[in-house]
Amino acid sequence: MILGIGSDLIDIRRIERSLDRFGERFTHRCFTEVERAKSDARAARAAS
């Protein structure tokens, strides 16, 4: 396992499309529980 700090650069529109298409299945596959909680609390969910 690799642990570290970094920044990912992505096209937010791709994340928005994946959220629309796959919903919770996408978030559970790609994000930790803490990341999902932070994302759910924001208005711009895909940008978080």
Image: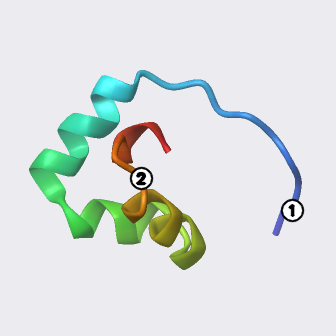
Q: Which mark is residue 39?
A: none
Element assignment for label 1: loop
Q: Nearer the viewer, residue 28 or 48?
A: 48
In the picture, measured across the screen, residue 17 lies left or right of residue 7, that is: left
In the picture, measured across the screen, residue 21 lies left or right of residue 12, that is: left
* Image position, residue 30 (x, y; %): 45, 60
Q: Nearer the viewer, residue 37 or 4?
A: 37
Coloration of the structure image: rainbow
Residue that extends furthest to the bottom in the rendered view of this protein: 33
In the picture, measured across the screen, residue 5 lies left or right of residue 25, that is: right
Residue displayed at 22% across by 49% down: 19
* Image position, residue 14 (x, y; %): 30, 29
The crowding category of the residue bearing disc 2, from other C-alpha atoms within 10 Å (few below 14, some 14 to 19, many at least 20), is few
For the residue marked with disc 1, what is the amino acid? Leu
Q: Relative to 42, does residue 32 appear above or below in the rendering?
A: below
Element assignment for label 2: loop
What residue does disc 2 label?
42
* Image position, residue 28 (x, y; %): 38, 72
Residue displayed at 41% across by 53% down: 42
* Image position, residue 11 (x, y; %): 42, 21
The crowding category of the residue bearing disc 1, from other C-alpha atoms within 10 Å (few below 14, some 14 to 19, many at least 20), is few
Residue displayed at 29% across by 25% down: 13
Q: Nearer the viewer, residue 3 or 1?
A: 3
For the residue marked with disc 2, what is the amino acid? Arg
Callout 2–callout 1 Cβ contact below 8 Å: no
Q: Which mark is residue 3?
A: 1
Measured in 3D between alpha carbons, the distance from the residue under mark 2 to the one under mark 1, in whole angstroms, is: 25 Å
Q: Which quadrant of the figure has residue 17?
A: top left
